[in-house]
Image: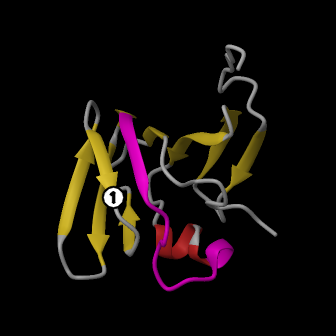
Amino acid sequence: MATEVKNFDSPDETRQFAGNGQAKVVQLAGHAIAEGTFEPGWKWSENVKPIAGTDSCQVAHVGYVLSGSMRIFMDDGTEAEVNAGDVFAIPPGHDAEVPGPEACVMVDFGEIGNYAKRN
């Protein structure tokens, strides 16, 4: 296997949300890695649900927050918040929103192969 180096400034693809942000995706060693920019007011149930077609996000996320914050609402009623500098693992079955005036930017190494991908 050869060494691979890519940069989010030249992603393999860019997935636009239904308003308020985008995910830049690179493919490395057979895995999709995304840099997501979630703008103020972004909410999964409003900006990605129309693309995903599921009641809640069914993707497992593992990543690192570069800036901003995001509030996570699990289907079981529990909640969490991730902030700049946090490393996170979020299982499937959640909604999320950007609560503040700053965009949330994060890198996601999870199962995002089809996340926010239009068919």
Q: Is the residue 3 above or below the residue 32 in the image? A: above
Query: Can you say which quadrant of the picture contains the N terminus?
Result: top right
Q: Residue at x 39, y 41 (%)?
A: 63
| Residue located 70% across and 36% down the image | 27
Q: Can you tell which quarter of the image residue 10 is in?
A: top right
Residue 26 lies in the magenta stretch = no
Q: How is the image coloured?
A: secondary structure
Asked whether residue 60 is drawn in magenta, I would say yes
Left or right: 13, with 104 as reference point: right
Instruction: Please state the extent of the stretch shown in magenta in the rendering.
Output: 50-65
Which image quarter: residue 36?
top right
The kind of residue on which mark 1 rests is Ile
- Residue 39 screen position, x and y as percent: 50, 49
Q: Which residue is mark 1?
A: 90
Question: Which residue is pictured at 63% across the width and 82% down the height?
Answer: 53
Mark 1, Cα crowd under 10 Å, few <14 / some 14-19 / many 20+, is some
